[in-house]
Image (cartoon, rainbow, N blue to C red):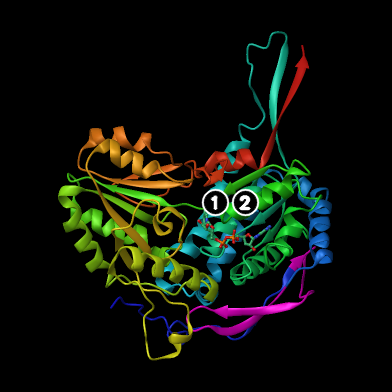
Amino acid sequence: MSSPAGQLPEARGARKAVRIRHYTAGRFHTDGEPFPLVDPVDGRTVGQVPEAGAATVDAAVRAAREALSGPWASYGPADRSRVLHRVADGIEARFEEFVAAECSDTGKPRELAASVDIPRGIANFRAYADLSASRSEQSWHTETPDGRGALNYTVHKPLGVVAVVAPWNLPLLLLTWKVAPALAMGNTVVAKPSELTPSTAELLAEVMDEVGLPAGVFNLVHGHGADAAGARLTGHPGVDAIAFTGESRTGRAIMHAAADQLTPVSFELGGKNAGIVFADADLEKAVAGTLRSSFTNSGQVCLCTERVYVERPVFEEFTAALAKGAESVPYGPLASAEHRDKVAGYLAKAAADGTVRAGGDSPVFGDARDGGFWVRPTVLTGLPEDHPAVREEIFGPVVHVAPFDTEEEAVALANAGPYGLAATVWTGDLSRAHRVAPRLDVGIAWVNTWNLRDLRTPFGGVKASGIGREGGHHSLDFFSEPMNVCVKI
Ligand code: NAD
């Protein structure tokens, strides 16, 4: 049995009951119909979240618009850089509170929130504080130095009011990944976290307030997506750009709404990421790497590997080791009862049509956790490539392993399907690594590793996995408008 260690709320120091608040125009409030906030570890209601109605979303967008011409307009790049570092300091100062809030909303193991989610939230602010400051040194620059009798220079201006809509899997990390560069480039923000995970966003609003960010520069509204706060925000005529992370289906709905105003979008969407294991790979490392890439955060990371193709001579050895490893990998619950039911639906179909090599069901604890949304890390084999469990994004702790015979076949299998976010190649042959990786239809290909990220590199997906690139200068580009000024000499 796998080890969901230290997962009882008592063991991780759960918070008291919480009441989540919106933050608009520098004011915290709870306008709107409340809905329950649930801890996925045991299914308990731990707080209330207000659903932002049209008036609240309007007020947030108006505040963000007004703030563009307030004191924020006089903040130069260095001032903005300084304030972003103060936000990072503010999160650091309340680190344990952020960790506890993230664990309570998501049910993830404390070690994960403390080693990934919250440190990356801090790093996002620091990275964009530094990057935008260094870009500002070049932001007034000539692009045609030969001149032809004119001096041309480029000014990078903010877009205006940016709507940031984030998912529940890495709540603070993914929200700040967009909020930080948006603010770094001088925009104002209205953010909406997932309805399932609003708590660290609220703590972030408190930090923004504490560091003295001018009122209206950062606004936070809570609520659901379709026909609710999310749709109200992304369809709002006062929004100048939309940065969204979530399901591809939601991206399509947001793009329809954005089309009316021709609002620019940056989308980080779903994935059905493949791993390719060649027989010349270090198998021990490939197994350990795949256990990480398939089961981190219980498979609820957009970059997680859900399909592995293994060269036939090592297929059985790899699969047996992966299945054995899956029995002892640490894991947490899924985000909600609805999501658990969706994953369980895929598992039922997979069990009927293929072979379950590990997991495949929910654990029984005999304690409060039996009310939570748990699914054991699962390894499947024997399903056809067009099976829903092999083709569709499950977003849970489930991986299917299949054999291949040639490099050509492995590339074709990995590239099949509607998504194109990330892939991982395991091989001991350097030439093969460089030959195969660029042929993969994805935004990110890792070789002999997974999720090794430098925040300055381009991040995003192709096909149904996204539009545009974020990370480093790519984010600064999205969140700003380059303007040409031409002076006749
Ligand atoms: P989701 O699309 O259901 O929700 C994401 C956010 O959008 C939430 O805040 C939600 O309230 C809001 N929303 C939903 N419908 C909306 C609508 N019609 N208009 C406006 N807003 C709406 O996604 P999720 O279930 O929260 O997250 C899981 C998904 O996110 C997976 O598909 C995963 O692959 C993807 N994801 C992608 C990346 C990436 O970087 N590519 C990262 C993390 C997660």
Asked if residue 274 lies left or right of residue 193, the reply is left
Asked if residue 153 lies left or right of residue 70, the reply is left
Mark 1 residue CB less than 8 A from any atom of ligand 1: yes
The residue that appears at 26% across and 59% down in the rendered structure is: 288
Region rendered in magenta: 23-50
Q: Is residue 8 visible?
A: yes
The residue that appears at 25% across and 66% down in the rendered structure is: 323
| Residue 5 image point, x, y percent | 35, 79
In the image, 457 versus 36, the foreground residue is 36
In the image, 242 versus 387, the foreground residue is 387
The kind of residue on which mark 2 rests is Gly
Mark 2 residue CB less than 8 A from any atom of ligand 1: yes
Q: Are marks 1 and 2 in contact (CB under 8 Å)?
A: yes
Q: Is residue 220 visible?
A: no
Disc 1 versus disc 2: distance between alpha carbons? 7 Å
Which label belongs to residue 269?
1
- The image quadrant of residue 429 is top left
Write down the residue under mark 2. 251
Q: Is residue 434 above or below residue 237?
A: above
Furthest-front residue in view?
352
